[in-house]
Amino acid sequence: MRLFKDFSTRPEKLGLTIGNFDGVHRGHHLLIDSLRARVKEQGVVGALTFSNHPSYVLNHLPPSPLLCSKLHKIRLLQEAGVDTCFSIAFTEALAALSYREFLARIREAFPFDFLILGKGAAFGKKQEGNQEQILKLADEWGFEAIYLEKLEGISSGLIRKTILEGALDVAAQMLGRPFSILGELKEGVLLFEEALCLPPKGSYPVVVRSEEGSYRAKALVDKSVSIGDLPQPLHGAVEILFDPLHL
């Protein structure tokens, strides 16, 4: 991550992408990789995401189980190449902003030169900030807006469906990595604060990553997630990777 020691130092280019980024899958990586290509090595890749799912505020629907926790999402975004991340709460007040007000607030904190979004992305009150309006605003405000075609057959919703059905090998292909969960391991039980998407009840081969190292183990998914067959007792923060090669 880049470090600046005074306010007069500005990287050559600032690029931004906006989205919920649940799971940080291959489609999200495409946006981030495209930003990196635009801003080059001396620029900064930024991502704006939400600490809660916008559909809960916009449609008053109970949130779907998440593919990753807030902390895990930020870690995955950093691993994907994001230098600066804004994780903000999606509120009624935020939803009431026009797309111009919304982007103006972002540009005050992060005056981006490039904005890269997926096709169909829209934001602002009543989602009036569609591609046509954003392209006009880009010309007016002097930034470049780019819309990328979504990768066919890849979305957070589809990945969630495959995990709930137990097709973890298919989920791994869409994610570009094994499906994993970040949590706190206490007396063999994985603790996590948010409602996460889990595969069906059963026993699964996993890899447990901790500060001590990585270990093969078994995860028993039921009302909770228990970890067994570890070569040594583990406690504290861990990442549990469901191993599609040994299912």
Image (cartoon, helix red, strand yellow):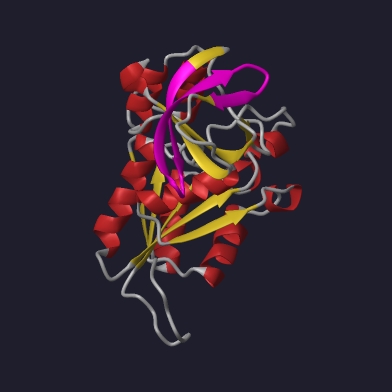
Residue 41, given in percent of the width and then of the height, sits at 25, 66
Residue 68, given in percent of the width and then of the height, sits at 54, 37
Q: Nearer the viewer, residue 3 or 107?
A: 3
Identify the image quadrant of residue 206.
top left
Q: Is residue 226 magenta?
A: yes
Q: Is residue 38 above or below residue 154?
A: below
Q: Determine if residue 80 is in view.
A: yes
Q: Determine if residue 20 is in view.
A: no
Count all numbered tags in the image, as a single digit: 0
Q: Quadrant of the N terminus?
A: bottom left
Q: Is residue 79 above or below residue 186?
A: below
Residue at screen point 29% across, 49% down: 33
Identify the image quadrant of residue 70.
top right
Q: Which span is picked out in magenta?
A: 204-227
Dominant SS in magenta: strand
Residue at screen point 44% across, 40% down: 209
Q: Nearer the viewer, residue 220 or 82?
A: 220
Residue at screen point 69% across, 52% down: 94
Residue 46, given in percent of the width and then of the height, sits at 43, 59
Q: Is residue 95 above or below residue 171?
A: below
Q: Nearer the viewer, residue 19 or 80?
A: 80
Residue 134, given in percent of the width and then of the height, sits at 46, 52
Q: Is residue 12 magenta?
A: no
Q: Quadrant of the C terminus?
A: top left
